[in-house]
Every structure is written in structure tokens, then in C-alpha cells.
Image: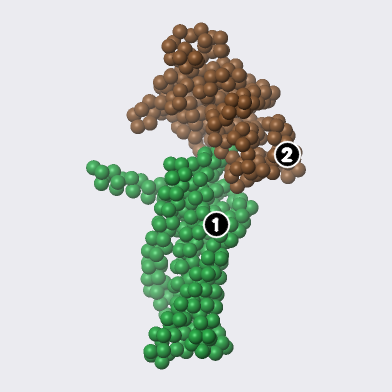
Chain colours: A green, B brown
Amino acid sequence: MVMLTWITNKLAAQGRGALFFGAFVRCLLTGRIRWNEVFRQIYEQGVRSLLIVTLVSFASGAVLALQGQVMMARFGAKEFIAQLVALSLIRELSPVFTALVFSGKSGAGMAAELGSMSVNSQIQATRTLGVDPMGFLVVPRMLACLVVLPILVVVSELMGIFGGYLVAIHEANIPPVYYINQTVQCIAFVDFFSGFAKVFFFAVIIGWICCYKGFFTSGGSMGVGRYTTAAVALCYVGVIVSNTLLTKIILTFWGN
Amino acid sequence: MIRVRGLSKSFNGQTVLAGLDFDVPDGEILAVMGSSGTGKSVLLLNLIGLMPPDSGAIEVNGVAVTRLAEPELLKFRRHVGYLFQDSALYDFMTVEENIAFPLREHTASGLAVIRARVDELLRMVDMAGAGGKYPSELSGGMRKRAALARALALGSKVLLCDEPTSGLDPVRSRDISLLIRDLSKKLGCTTLITTHDVRNAFRTADRALVLHQGRAVACGTEQELRAVADPFVREFLE
């Protein structure tokens, strides 16, 4: 009986989540878009995550180069570090790492902000003022995710490559010009596309989960903590699982 | 005018409102009193269409609220001011921005007109000069007044106030009660407040209705209610 209730509750939550997304799409297509709010959210989400994305990406690129030079030296292929760093970052690591970091910073921020508004009756107040909270609170945040995350991914790729570059020229003694040439030459459009295409899916997943969890937060300040944590955990699972599926789909169609 | 007929609402089998009937004529202030958990807030949420009743009819200024779908409810709510128990001001906006919000959303007025209206509303609630502050910088009483200004921004002729004195000291409670009365009378609003603060309810309202176990057990002026023999009403008022 307890198991059945648990399953029913989970199914109901999935249904409510789907309805929430449907309401977002309907509002996006038929409602008024509050561009001021969208720009405010772009600024807030971007600023919130920029520094940490920069640091994480720089360190990731540097570590890739450090490990790469050791591994590749064993096969006498040390001069291919540039390719290793650039392709790893652009095809896989930057989109996924950035999405995870973005979930933890901006996603958590969104969920906590909406959650706090929910428990303090501000979402209800929006309705009493004759304004649809979906259009005022959710649409701008989700649109901002779709703008900010791709920009952060490009920043992450550049910073990662820069981190790898510094390690390669100082630790592996690879000539700077050679490293840059190798990087530029190895990146084909399909490499960039295969990584970048996923970012938009991640943005939708993160925006959806965090706004949904925040919007329906209950239980006071403890509830805000609980729902925010759940939102971030769900984002991590959503990003990692969807990345597996998307990678398979992309490799199937654009494998070469 | 607010007209409620046979309003019932229950949660998980527990009846909160059981066939409630009452009217609030145009321009009158009615206080709905009752112990905590007797469904006063539920009544207000039903009145403004944020919660559907199980049965019964609600009419506000000729609009049958219970028959409206969400898009129509959003339009209807523009004509009803709602003061929340915890003020529910947006944390990320200043007081001015909070008050200007419904004006920006629902009117085509320019910035200068909106600013003038906001200044007028701030003066009405004795908060001139505090418009640039954020809600977190305000006392409980000031937050209530700012929320009252926002509720009245669109010139609503119906005002619903949920526990306007809760969380305030006796002096601030008196001040907000008198302010609600003054503004309601001055603006000609039909006002319904829910409260368990008997003294301030009679300060604010023309009549009061006592709720007990989901029903209206008494309704009238202070003198009329004090003459009621019902033991619950007597105990509640004392």
C-alpha cells in the first residue's frame, strides 16, 4: 500500500511537471514576453555562474593537458595534446561541466528564489494582481537559461583550451604557435556542433526542473532548502542521463 | 457588492466552510472573525478565485467568480485589491516598484503618470519618502501599508484583507486598522477583512460576522454581536 502510494505520488509529480512545461510553452507562444525581466535574469544568471565556470574550465583544461602529456608520452604522441584538450572539451567536457556548474549556481538560485517567493505568498500575490506568474516569473528565467548557458559553454571552451595551452607550453615544452595551430586545425564544425547542440537541451532541462521545483515549494524555509537540493540533484541526473542519450544520437547521425 | 451563498469547502474530509451565506453591500466594511483555523483565509482565497469551492456561489460586483476560468479570473482580479497576511511584497523590488507593478502590467500609462500615481499612493498610506526602500528594510507595519498601497494601485472598488493586524504590536495594529477604514471609506471600497483581533475588527468594520465550524453563527454591529446569547460568540468576543 505504501509502495503504491509512493508510485502514485511520483506519477502525479511527473504529470504535474509535464503540465508545467506545457503551460510554459503555451505562455511563451501566446503570452507577452517581459524583455526587461529576461535581460535581468540573463545578467543575474550569467554573473552568478561566470567566475566559477571560468575557474572550473581553466582547471579542467589544465588537468587534461597534465594527464595527457604523461599518457601520450608513453606512445610518443605528446605533440597531440592540443587535439586531446580541444576535442575533449568541445565535444563533451565543457557542455557537461558547464551545465553541472550552472545547475549548482544559477539553477539552485532560481529554485531558491522561486521557492522563497512561493512560501512567502508572492506567487499567489502575482495572481491576485491579475498577472500570470508563469509569464512573469518562469518564462523570463527559462529564456535566460537558453541564452546564458550557451554563452557560458563558449567561455568554458576558451578557458579550458587556455588552461591546456599554459600547461602544454610550460610543462610539455610544446611551442605556443604549434599548439595554437593544432587546436585550430583539429576542430571541425561537427565537433563544435556535437557539443553545442546538447547545451540547449541542458538549458531546457535545468530551467524546467529548477523553475518547477521552486514554483511548487511548500513547507517554509525548510521546504525551500529541501526543494532546492532536490532541484539541483535532479538537474545533475537529468544532464548526465540526457547527455548519454544525446551523445549516442549525435554520434549515430554525425559520427564522423 | 459581495454575495456568498452556500459556500462549502473541505480538505481531506475535514469541513472548513459549511454552507456559508452572507452579503457585503457596496461601500460596507465587513470583518469576518473566528478562531485560527476556522477557514477565514480559505474564504478569501475562494472569493478571489485562487481556490475553487466544493459548492456554492460567489458574486463580486456582479461577477460570478465560481464560473470563471483562469484567464477570466486574472482579468477579474485586477478589480479586486488583496492584502496578504504576510504582505507578499516582491523582495527584489523596491516599495515604489512593487506599487508600480500592477500599473505597469495593466495600464498603458507612461513612466511620469505611474510615478505620480505611486507618489499619491505612498502619501495615502503615510509612506512618502520610503519608496526607494526594499521590503526587507521595512518594519512589519510599513510592509502592510506598502502592500495596501499596491492592493489599491489599480483603483479597485473591492478590498480583501487577510489578517491585516497579525504580527503587529497593538499600536501598529490600531494604525493599520484605522488606515484600512479611512481608505475604504474615502475610496468607496467594499471591504472584507478576516481577523481574530476583536478590538481592531470593530475599529475597522461596520459589521462583523463570526465564523464557527464553517458556519456564520452571528453577524451584526458590535452592539448587536455583544447581545448575542450564543456561548461561542460570547466567549470569542470576551
What x and y, as percent, mark residue B128? 72, 36
Q: Is residue A199 above or below residue B200?
A: below
- Residue at 54% over, 62% down: A49
Measuring from the top left, give residue B108's x and y in whole percent.
69, 42
Residue where numbered disc 1 is placed? A143
Extreme residue in the bottom direction: A76
Asked if the residue at tag 1 contacts the one at tag 2, i.e. Cβ–Cβ closer than 8 Å, the answer is no
* Total count of labels: 2
Quadrant hosting residue B76: top right
* Residue drawn where x is 48% and y is 51% of the image: A111
Q: Is residue A173 above or below residue B48?
A: below
Q: Which residue in the protein does label 2 denote?
A: B129
Residue A22 in sight: no
Of residues B153 and A246, which is closer to you in this image? B153
Please state which of the two labelled residues, at mark 2 or mark 1, is closer to the viewer: 2
A150 is higher (above) or lower (below) than A23: below
Q: Residue at x 46, y 23 (%)?
A: B35
Q: Nearer the viewer, residue A7 or A68?
A: A68
Residue in the image at 52% along x and 77% along y = A163
Query: Residue B82: which numbered mark, if any?
Result: none
Residue B31 sits in quarter = top right
Instruction: Indicate the secondary structure of the residue bearing disc 2.
Output: loop
**In which chain is the residue bearing label 2?**
B
Q: Secondary structure at mark 1?
A: helix
Residue type at numbered disc 2: Gly
Q: Chain of mark 1?
A: A
Q: Quadrant of the N terminus of chain B?
A: top right
- The reply to whether residue B93 is visible in this rendering is yes
Query: Identity of the amino acid at label 1?
Result: Leu
